[in-house]
Image: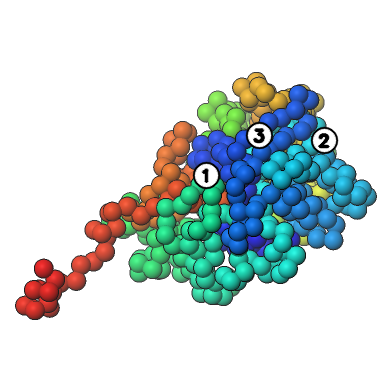
């Protein structure tokens, strides 16, 4: 229940049992957590965070800037092999330290005193405070004594977050309770959180557990179950659907034929009927994409960009003919590569395949290959055509658009796009201008068809009507449930309302004496 040596092996509760420097609310505004405030140097390179001075770990030991420094140093240490180190690459010398080419004391993370820590970046990084949402601290003294297992047992778990570990029964449940030593700004309401653990080797019986009243919250991804809930009068109002910040799109090799011709790329973009995809293969689990940025993501401009790659089979055929492939004649054999995707995504790819055949009269294959093979081929920029997803890492436009720079994973280059994104990435102190630069860049990406943007993932969640809190309320973009990683940031806002009393079945008295004793 800690990120001391690994991010991908953490379990439920890690983010609310350990305190990061910052958190965000449901509108992605930065909130103080361990840090009361922060400031940036005039050159935009150094961010200084000031810690709340009375924070303590569960055993009473003070939380200091040196604990945060130690955590970051451990993640950058080549001996750790931290699996999330790439996320912190904007920090000065991070990549060189991780590679073992520079010493640890050259890292741009330094505790200035017990309550002040400085992060220096290679270039101005306006989104640095957002990155530091992912700064959960490990108690140095406990790690030195127990190693990573300090957080796996209730008797040694002494974190700094709003909750502490009460019980962890393998393959059964994790129980959290409010930490009596927590002094931070995110004090929780819930007196106990129980996470039921299911066997990952089989399809977890989430809906069955919910219907049986065993749990108050689940995530649904099974389309048949989602449809069954929607048709159930007693359950349909419990279902909450919202767009995830994930985009599926067609990647194309624009450096080589046939996709080096923009007319071919445009033809593909106008040949895919997104509405049909949403009503068939992707029913209830996807939203049509107009661009890389999903609705509600910073700088997203979905409505303004919606018409650029809109479905228009007649225009698609004309563009393909202009490119020298009338009615598909002479078009080379290509395949849509998939990265080891599940059946539902494979089915969607086959639907795209059928649309390209119907509207452009070209034969396109579908290859669902092993993830390792796909990644190696993509990194070598040897993929001609692929259907691939990308899900955000932090809530800032730079995260989704920097991905499209020429040094990234896509064989596409546009000089104007490159200039706009690079300028926006280092613009500190003018968020409106920064967003305008990103919006201009994304329009270029869509018009030049760097990718064919197909859909954004929809998340379907169920929770009891008596579960309330800011994590579940509509944000400023109108989404009822965009939680902004609520398990990471907003869990302390949840509470159980008095409506729960109406939801608990009342036992009828069995007789006169039962009736009398219950009056």
Give the quadrant of residue 151. bottom right
Locate residue 334, reporting x and y percent: 75, 48
Locate residue 29, reporting x and y percent: 55, 35
Q: Residue at x 45, y 48 (%)?
A: 493
> Total number of numbered labels?
3
The residue that disc 3 covers is: 38
Give the quadrant of residue 289. top right
- Looking at marks 3 and 1 on the same chain, the residue that comes earlier in the sequence is marked by 3
Closer to the camera, 513 or 341?
513
The residue that disc 1 covers is: 185
Q: Residue at x 42, y 53 (%)?
A: 189
Frontmost of labels 2 and 3 is 3
Which dot marks residue 122? 2
Query: Can you say whether 361 is above or below 199 in the image?
Result: above
Disc 2 element: loop
Locate residue 314, reporting x and y percent: 58, 31
Disc 3 element: strand
Task: Using the numbered discs, state the Cα–Cα distance from disc 2 to disc 3 in whole angstroms.
Answer: 19 Å
Q: Is residue 69 left or right of residue 23?
A: right
Q: Residue at x 80, y 60 (%)?
A: 80
Locate residue 310, reporting x and y percent: 56, 32
């Amino acid at each position: 229940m800690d990120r001391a040596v690994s991010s991908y092996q953490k379990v439920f509760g890690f983010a609310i049992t350990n305190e990061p420097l910052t958190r965000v609310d449901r509108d992605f505004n930065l909130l103080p957590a361990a840090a009361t405030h922060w400031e940036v140097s005039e050159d935009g390179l150094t961010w200084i965070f000031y810690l709340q001075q009375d924070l303590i770990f569960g055993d009473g030991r003070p939380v200091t800037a040196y604990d945060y420094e130690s955590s970051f140093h451990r993640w950058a240490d080549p001996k750790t092999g931290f699996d999330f180190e790439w996320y912190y690459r904007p920090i000065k010398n991070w990549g060189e330290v991780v590679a073992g080419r520079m010493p640890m004391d050259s890292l741009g993370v330094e505790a200035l005193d017990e309550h002040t820590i400085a992060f220096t970046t290679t270039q101005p990084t306006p989104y640095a405070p957002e990155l530091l949402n992912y700064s959960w601290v490990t108690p140095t003294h406990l790690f030195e004594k127990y190693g990573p297992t300090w957080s796996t047992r209730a008797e040694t778990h002494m974190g700094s977050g709003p909750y502490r570990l009460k019980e962890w029964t393998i393959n059964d449940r994790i129980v959290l309770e409010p930490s009596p030593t927590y002094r931070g700004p995110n004090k929780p309401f819930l007196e106990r959180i129980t996470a039921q653990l299911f066997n990952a080797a089989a399809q977890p019986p989430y809906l069955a557990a919910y219907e049986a009243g065993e749990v108050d919250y689940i995530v649904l991804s099974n389309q048949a179950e989602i449809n069954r809930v929607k048709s159930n009068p007693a359950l349909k109002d419990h279902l909450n659907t919202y767009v995830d910040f994930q985009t599926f799109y067609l990647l194309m090799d624009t450096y080589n034929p046939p996709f080096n011709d923009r007319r071919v790329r445009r033809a593909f973009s106008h040949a895919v009927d997104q509405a049909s995809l949403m009503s068939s293969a992707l029913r209830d689990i996807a939203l049509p994409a107009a661009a890389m940025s999903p609705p509600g993501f910073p700088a997203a401009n979905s409505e303004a960009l919606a018409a650029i790659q809109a479905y228009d089979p007649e225009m698609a055929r004309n563009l393909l003919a202009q490119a020298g492939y009338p009615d598909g004649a002479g078009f080379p054999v290509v395949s849509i590569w998939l990265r080891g995707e599940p059946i539902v995504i494979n089915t969607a790819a086959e639907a795209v395949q059928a649309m390209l055949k119907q509207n452009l009269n070209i034969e396109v294959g579908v290859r669902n290959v092993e993830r390792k093979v796909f990644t190696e081929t993509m990194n070598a920029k040897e993929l001609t055509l692929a259907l691939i997803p990308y899900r955000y890492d932090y809530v800032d436009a730079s995260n989704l658009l920097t991905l499209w720079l020429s040094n990234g994973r896509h064989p596409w280059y546009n000089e104007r796009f490159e200039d706009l994104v690079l300028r926006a990435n280092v613009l500190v102190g003018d968020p409106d201008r920064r967003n305008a630069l990103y919006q201009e860049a994304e329009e270029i990406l869509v018009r030049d068809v760097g990718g064919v943007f197909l859909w954004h993932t929809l998340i379907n969640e169920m929770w009891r009507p008596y579960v309330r809190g800011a994590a579940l309320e509509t944000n400023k973009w109108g989404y009822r449930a965009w939680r902004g990683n609520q398990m990471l940031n907003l869990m302390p806002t949840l509470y159980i309302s008095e409506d729960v009393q109406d939801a608990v079945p009342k036992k009828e008295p069995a007789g006169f004496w039962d009736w009398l004793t219950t009056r």
